[in-house]
Image (cartoon, rainbow, N blue to C red):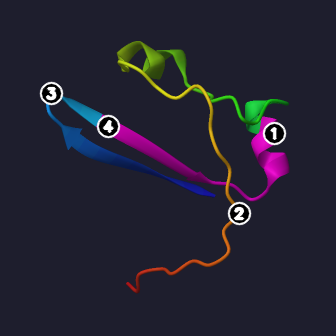
Amino acid sequence: MGAALLKRDLTGEAEVFVLTKWISMDAIRVFAGSDIEKAVVAPEAAAVLVEYDRTVRHYEVVSEVNQAD
C-alpha cells in the first residue's frame, strides 16, 4: 500500500528506518514467505549497509491522521 524511508544522521553514519504498509498479513506472507518476522533485504541493499536488523515487527494501524493537501 505504501512505504516511507526515514533517515537520521549520526556521527559518521546514517541510520535508516523503513516503514511499509500492507493490505493484509496474507499480503506480507506472499512477499516474505512463511517466516514473516525475517527481514527481506535485497542483496544489493545488504551490500551497502554496515548492518541491518535481521527481524521485523508488525503492527496493526488503529488510527491514522493524514496531512491535508
x and y percent of residue 12 in the render? 15, 27
Secondary structure beneath label 3: loop
Q: Which residue is mark 4?
A: 15
Q: Which residue is mark 1?
A: 29
- Residue at figure coordinates x 42%, y 44% from the top left: 17
Q: Earlier in the sequence, mark 1 or mark 3?
A: 3
- Indicate left or right for 58 with 35 as reference: left
Q: CA distance from mark 4 to mark 1?
A: 27 Å
Q: CA distance from mark 2 to mark 3?
A: 34 Å
The stretch in magenta equals 15-30
Residue sticking out furthest to the left: 11
x and y percent of residue 26 in the render? 85, 48
> Which label sits in the foreground, 4 or 1?
4
Amino acid carrying mark 2 in the image = Glu
Residue 12: numbered disc: 3
Q: Quadrant of residue 62?
A: bottom right
Amino acid carrying mark 1 in the image = Arg
